[in-house]
Amino acid sequence: MHAPTPQRRTPPPRTRHMPPTAGARRTPPPPPPPRGTPPEGPRARRSRARHELAQPRRVSAAGTTVRSFTGALAMGSLVLALALIGVQFWATSHGQQGPGVSAVLSQLVAGLVAVALQTYADRHRDRAGGAAVAGVLVVVLGSLWFWWW
């Protein structure tokens, strides 16, 4: 049998916490560039001037209020649909007719569509988001007028 060959030991890699080796001089890192200066190097990003319409706009208080109101309407519509489901199950378990399957399903679909439109309106603060806010109002108020008037 042969004896195993001895393993060659390599020193651990030097980290920033280890002292420099003897005779090596440590130089301080270069200071960071001042803010607002473009980065340098081969992978530096070239900044382009943005169009004035592409600039981020400040969100208005009125838009936030309208989106909050329509969000409350959308969630209220969904909660109403869930309550109708519970009432329908309770009524059928007691041998009564209840609100009806068509009313329950239509209110559930209206609630889900309203929440989906509201989610889109919250994520897109442009004309499409405004149209989604109007869609929430149409769906919720239309379902309330059609099924509850």
Image (cartoon, helix red, strand yellow):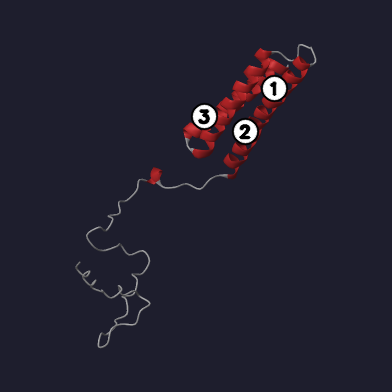
Which mark is first along the chain, 3 or 1? 1
Label 2, secondary structure: give it.
helix
Where is mark 1, residue-wise? 85
Inter-mark Cα distance, 1 to 2: 23 Å
Residue 21 screen position, x and y as percent? 28, 84
Q: Is residue 125 visible?
A: no
Quarter of the picture containing the C terminus is: top right
Q: Quadrant of residue 84?
A: top right
Q: From the viewer's perspective, tell me whether residue 23 is left or right of residue 101.
A: left
- Look at 63% across and 25% down and name the residue there: 140
- Type of amino acid at the residue the image marks with label 2: Thr
Marks 1,3: beta carbons within 8 A = no
Where is mark 2, residue-wise? 70
- Look at 27% across and 87% down and name the residue there: 22
Quarter of the picture containing the N terminus is: bottom left
In the displayed orientation, state which residue is furthest to the bottom.
23
- Type of amino acid at the residue the image marks with label 3: Ala
Residue 24 screen position, x and y as percent? 25, 85
Q: Looking at the image, which is closer to me, 6 or 107?
A: 6
Q: Is residue 39 visible?
A: yes
Label 3, secondary structure: give it.
helix
| Number of marks | 3
Inter-mark Cα distance, 1 to 3: 30 Å
Where is mark 3, residue-wise? 131
Which mark is first along the chain, 2 or 1? 2
